[in-house]
Image (spheres, rainbow, N blue to C red):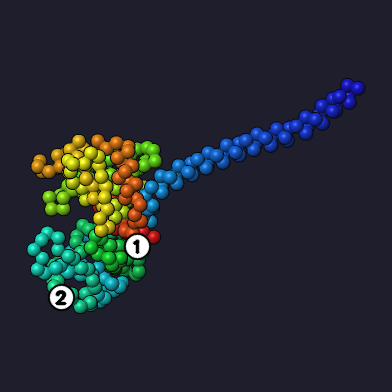
């Protein structure tokens, strides 16, 4: 009888073990899936606030010689990139045109003597062909995306990741605040004052060691004491920010001008700024890169 009971116990235990193991395994799988889904949701939420990705550029070069051109093809006999400036412009905001040297001049413009690939200029490398690098030439005024430069005229230069404390350093020529946590983690707010251009607030994101700022997220800012809170408006495709004295600070290098004090912004005010501009789809991006040998440099690229 004892033998029969023992056998029955062994049989029942043998049936229970797989069931218990399966339950534990299922529980772990569920917990792992829930954790993965939560992480994915958090990551997606952060990444989707500003819908841009880090640049895919893997190589940068710096110009080491003078009087060299940027060529339309990987050939020094091909047309070069030229810059033309509005002739009779009496303001500080003259129109610029970039075009190849074999194109006819536009009436009312004169050729600039400013050579684009000056010594010390950094270019992102898009590819290479023979003895030439294909480099990115986009900028605030130039819509031509690339040109070729002889490899003999450049040297390699290595970037290093940008850190939040580097951006928030007091000796920068811009004021900066990097959001450290929450929905807007890694969002970068930068405010810069210039006597000619006035004040500009920029909304970007710190991603993979770069600061990526959509060009449409540049906001013209100014003090307006009639406002009770910060106001973000859009007029003719451009954003404007109005803030009152409680959010103001004295501008760098001009004691008679003001800047927005980013440190005084509340979570709700930050959300208002970011949510206002991110409704607009980016097309071009200004990317900040740190080179230990040179400091901070910028280049543009097109959002895919």
Residue depicted at x 61% and y 39%: 29
Q: Is residue 118 positioned above or below 244 on the image?
A: below
Q: Position of residue 58 (x, y in %)?
A: 36, 56
Mark 1, Cα crowd under 10 Å, few <14 / some 14-19 / many 20+, is: some
Of the image marks 2 and 1, the number of the one nearer the N terminus: 2
Residue 248 visible, this angle: no
Residue depicted at x 33% and y 42%: 271
Q: Are marks 2 and 1 in contact (CB under 8 Å)?
A: no
Residue depicted at x 36% and y 47%: 207
Closer to the eye: label 2 or 1: 2
Q: Position of residue 50 (x, y in %)?
A: 36, 49
**Element at badge 1?**
strand
Of 115 and 157, the residue lying toward us: 115
Image quarter of residue 143: bottom left
Residue under label 2, please give it.
107
Residue depicted at x 78% and y 33%: 15
Q: Which mark is residue 148?
A: none
Q: Position of residue 16 (x, y in %)?
A: 75, 32
**Element at badge 2?**
loop
Of 133 and 233, the residue lying toward us: 233
Residue 227 visible, this angle: yes
Instruction: State which quarter of the image contains the C terminus.
Output: bottom left
Residue under label 1, please give it.
126
Q: Position of residue 35 (x, y in %)?
A: 53, 38
Identify the residue at the far top of this view: 2
Disc count in the image?
A: 2
Direction from residue 193 to residue 35 in the image, left or right: right
């Amino acid at each position: 009888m004892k033998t029969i009971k023992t056998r029955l116990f062994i049989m029942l235990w043998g049936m229970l073990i797989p069931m218990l193991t399966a339950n534990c395994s299922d529980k772990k799988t569920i917990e792992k899936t829930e954790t993965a889904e939560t992480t994915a949701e958090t990551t997606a939420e952060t990444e989707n606030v500003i819908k841009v990705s880090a640049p895919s550029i893997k190589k940068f070069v710096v110009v080491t010689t003078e009087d060299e051109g940027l060529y339309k093809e990987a050939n020094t006999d091909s047309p070069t990139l030229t810059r033309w400036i509005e002739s009779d412009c009496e303001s500080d905001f003259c129109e610029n045109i970039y075009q190849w040297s074999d194109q006819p001049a536009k009436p009312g413009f004169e050729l600039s003597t400013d050579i684009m690939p000056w010594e010390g200029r950094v270019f992102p490398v898009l590819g290479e062909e023979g003895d030439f690098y294909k480099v990115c030439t986009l900028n605030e005024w130039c819509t031509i995306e690339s040109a070729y430069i002889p490899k003999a005229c450049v040297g390699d230069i290595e970037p290093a990741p940008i850190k939040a404390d580097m951006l928030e350093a007091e000796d920068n020529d811009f004021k900066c605040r990097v959001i450290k946590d929450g929905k807007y983690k890694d969002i970068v707010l930068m405010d810069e004052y210039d006597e000619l251009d006035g004040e500009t607030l920029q909304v970007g994101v710190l991603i993979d060691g770069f600061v990526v700022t959509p060009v449409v997220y540049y906001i013209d800012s100014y003090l307006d004491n009639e406002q009770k809170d910060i106001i973000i408006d859009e007029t003719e495709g451009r954003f404007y920010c109005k803030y009152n004295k409680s959010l103001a600070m004295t501008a760098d290098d001009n004691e008679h001008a003001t800047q927005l004090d980013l440190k005084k912004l509340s979570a709700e005010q930050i959300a208002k700024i970011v949510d206002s501009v991110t409704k607009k789809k980016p097309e071009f991006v200004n990317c900040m890169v740190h080179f230990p040998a040179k400091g901070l440099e910028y280049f543009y690229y097109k959002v895919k």
